[in-house]
Image: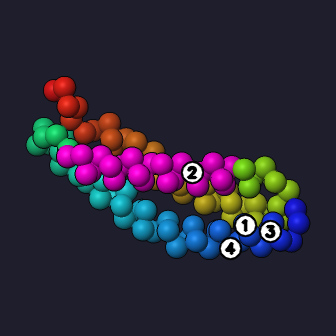
Amino acid sequence: MEKTQSDDINAQILKLRIALPIWGVEANDLVELAQNAERAAIRVDERTMQRVRGLIETTTGWHNTLLYWEEQDAAPALSAEIRVLRGSLDAMRTEVATATGMFPREDC
């Protein structure tokens, strides 16, 4: 891997490290909303569904980017960091997907 490519990846990873806690809070909020909606058997409004779709879309994009970087010939430390970040994103995506499944359906 060229130094410029490695430097670009490191710059992007810094952005991702800043965003992950924010997305984590968002995912946690959505899981809580899903649990509340399920208990109350109420529909979730469109704004909440847009938040869900936005978070899933964003984290999926980063997940795919991390997969691509993982396939590159990165230094071992960078490769390990990419795998850890991807694991964190995967866990968050799983939580949001599970929460989405709790939302009462429109046809109910």
Separation of residues labelled 4 and 3 (CA atoms)? 9 Å
Q: Main secondary structure of the magenta part?
A: helix
- Asked whether the beta carbons under mark 1 and mark 3 sit within 8 Å of each other, the answer is yes
Position of residue 8 in the picture relative to residue 73 (left or right): left
Magenta-drawn segment: 45-67
User: Which residue is disc 3 drawn over?
Assistant: 6
**What amino acid is at disc 2?**
Gly
Checking the image for residue 11, the label placed there is 4
- Categorize mark 3 by other alpha carbons within 10 Å: few (<14), some (14-19), many (20+): some
Checking the image for residue 61, the label placed there is 2
Residue 10 image offset from top left, x and y in percent? 71, 71
Q: Secondary structure at mark 3?
A: helix
- Please state, as top left, top right, bottom left or bottom right, where the C terminus lies in the image: top left
Q: Secondary structure at mark 4?
A: helix
Position of residue 11 in the picture relative to residue 32 (left or right): right
Checking the image for residue 9, the label placed there is 1
- Asked whether the beta carbons under mark 4 and mark 1 sit within 8 Å of each other, the answer is yes
In terms of depth relative to the viewer, which is nearer, 92 or 19? 19
Mark 2 or mark 1, earlier in chain: 1
Residue 38 image offset from top left, x and y in percent? 19, 41
- Asked whether the beta carbons under mark 4 and mark 3 sit within 8 Å of each other, the answer is no
- Asked whether the beta carbons under mark 2 and mark 3 sit within 8 Å of each other, the answer is no
Separation of residues labelled 4 and 1 (CA atoms)? 5 Å
Separation of residues labelled 1 and 3 (CA atoms)? 5 Å
Q: Secondary structure at mark 2?
A: helix
